[in-house]
Image (cartoon, rainbow, N blue to C red):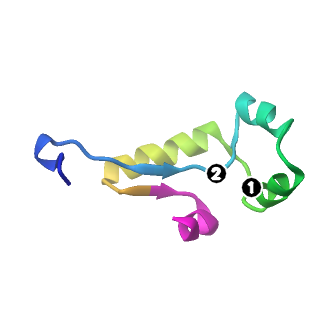
Amino acid sequence: MELERENIYITLVFPPDTDTPGLKEENKSKPKETQMINETSGLLSAEQVAKKIIQSTRKGSFTCSYGINGFLLT
């Protein structure tokens, strides 16, 4: 709100697991319990995540979440 006069807006993004080399590396040492939780929310491509971020920022949304689980967690 403070930066609205400057035409600066913020969108908080809560992306799900995204199919990237970084995630593959992270999964090597991720605790089993965390892996089980993450499996319930699915895996999106980087392109899917980016598309939703762009749509949300263009709409002026304050948050950008994915699916019902992401929405409920925000």
Q: Is residue 65 above or below residue 18?
A: below
Determine crowd level at label 2: few under 14, some 14-19, many 20+ residues with C-alpha closer than 10 A.
some
Q: Is residue 69 magenta?
A: yes
Marks 2 and 1 in Cβ contact (< 8 Å): yes
**Residue 37 coordinates in the image, percent (x, y):** 79, 60
Residue 65: x and y in percent read: 52, 58
Q: Give the side of residue 46 with respect to residue 37, left or right.
A: left
Q: Residue at x 36, y 47 (%)?
A: 57
Labelled disc at residue 19:
none
**Which residue is the site of mark 1?**
42
Q: Residue furthest left?
A: 5
Q: Amino acid type of disc 2?
A: Pro
Residue 53 location, x and y as percent? Answer: 46, 46
Q: Which mark is residue 16?
A: 2
Residue for point 35% across, 57% down:
61
Mark 2 element type: loop
Helix, strand or loop at mark 1: loop
Q: Quadrant of residue 73?
A: bottom right
User: Crowding at label 1, few (<14), some or many (≥20) Cα neighbours within 10 Å?
Assistant: few
Q: Quadrant of the N terminus?
A: bottom left
Magenta span of residues: 64-74
As for residue 34 lying within the magenta part, the answer is no
At label 1, which amino acid type do we have?
Gly
